[in-house]
Amino acid sequence: MSWFRRTASRGKKSRGYGSRSRTVDDAVTSHLTQFARTRRGVEAFVEPQTAVTQTTLLLVAFDGEWTRRVVPSPEWAHAFATSLQIPGYDAAVVGYPQRMRDYNTRNKRHPDLR
């Protein structure tokens, strides 16, 4: 049974992935999926939970454009990246790509060019 069929049978409101069964808002899943499918060269960076933040998934496109959303667990984030066939990395291990920092710098200098 495929990953999407298993999740579709669970219902839209509660999607338990990985070792924890917390819910994922459909808007979050939709946003991340749309971002990954409408941009080239997207990579996923899983940011671990800290004392002040929850686990997040950061998606970075080839030009450095990025988006970040809270996700239930690192396992969920890696499964999500695998389902979209994009590479997934642990941000605490590999860090962030230079193109993301370059994108932020470009948009600070010229915010009207977004």
Image: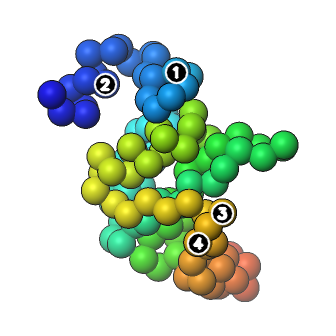
Helix, strand or loop for disc 3: helix
Badge 2 local density, few (<14 within 10 Å), some, or many (20+)? Answer: some
Q: Nearer the viewer, mark 2 or mark 3?
A: 3
Q: Nearer the viewer, mark 2 or mark 1?
A: 1
Helix, strand or loop for disc 1: loop
Q: Where, by quadrant of the figure, is residue 4 drawn? A: top left
Q: Nearer the viewer, mark 4 or mark 2?
A: 4
The type of residue carrying mark 2 is Thr
x and y percentages locating residue 75 in the rendered image: 48, 41
> Which of pointers 2 and 1 lies earlier in the amino acid sequence?
2
Task: Please name the residue that numbered disc 1 is placed on.
Answer: 21
Task: Please name the residue that numbered disc 2 is placed on.
Answer: 7
x and y percentages locating residue 16 in the rendered image: 45, 23
Residue 64, relative to residue 92: is it above or below?
Answer: below
The type of residue carrying mark 4 is Val
Badge 3 local density, few (<14 within 10 Å), some, or many (20+)? Answer: few
x and y percentages locating residue 91 in the rendered image: 61, 63
> Which of pointers 4 and 1 lies earlier in the amino acid sequence?
1
Residues under labels 2 and 1: Cα distance?
A: 12 Å
The type of residue carrying mark 3 is Ala
> Which of pointers 4 and 2 lies earlier in the amino acid sequence?
2
Residues under labels 4 and 2: Cα distance?
A: 30 Å
Query: Looking at the rendered structure, which numbered label has been put on residue 107?
Result: none
Pointer 3 with pointer 4, Cβ within 8 A: no
Q: Nearer the viewer, residue 5 or 109?
A: 5
The type of residue carrying mark 1 is Ser
Query: Looking at the rendered structure, which numbered label has been put on residue 94?
Result: 4
Residues under labels 4 and 1: Cα distance?
A: 27 Å
Pointer 2 with pointer 1, Cβ within 8 A: no
Helix, strand or loop for disc 2: helix
Pointer 2 with pointer 3, Cβ within 8 A: no
Task: Please name the residue that numbered disc 3 is placed on.
Answer: 92
